[in-house]
Image (cartoon, rainbow, N blue to C red):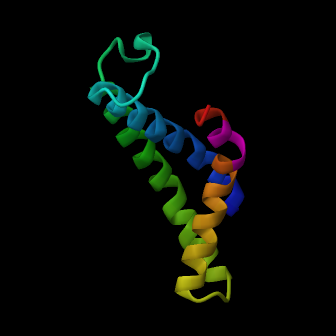
Amino acid sequence: MGVGLGWLCRFPLVWTCLTGRAVAWKAGWASIDPTLVDDGIYLFFVMIAGLWMLFLLIAAPLNALARRATSLSGRQWWWTSAMLWVTPFAVLDLPGLLR
């Protein structure tokens, strides 16, 4: 289930990375395609907020149910689930975003 939630977590993480790049472009630290920010940089923040809220509305109840079904301590569960959530993004999306 953690990897499945991680696959779902890819979408807000990609938009978060794009927003970081757009903010860096606005500050003059990076270069991006100007057509990406034609509608303004604030659209990125709206998309991030909506995607993270949707993800949390799906992930929080599922994570709470899965936590009850395991014998891991709270600290072990948190680190395990965080690593499983980030793994699909790190394998599938991060190499393309770093180019």
Identify the residue at the far front of this view. Answer: 29
Horizontal and vertical percent position of residue 2: 67, 62
Q: Position of residue 34 (x, y in %)?
A: 40, 12
Q: Quadrant of the C terminus?
A: top right
Q: Nearer the viewer, residue 87 or 8?
A: 87
Main secondary structure type of the part rendered in magenta: helix
Quadrant the N terminus occupies: bottom right
**Res 77 quadrant in image:** bottom right
The residue sitting at 64% across, 87% down in the picture is 72
In depth, the one of 96 and 57 nearer the eye is 96
Is residue 34 found left or right of 91 in the rendered image?
left
Please tell me in which quadrant of the rendered image residue 36 appears: top left
Q: Which residues are magenta?
A: 91-95
- Image position of 48 (left or right of 28): right
Q: Residue at x 29, y 19 (%)?
A: 40
**Where in the figure is residue 18, as x and y percent of width and height?**
46, 33
At 32% from the left edge and 14% from the top edge, which residue is drawn? 39
Membership of 93 in magenta stretch: yes
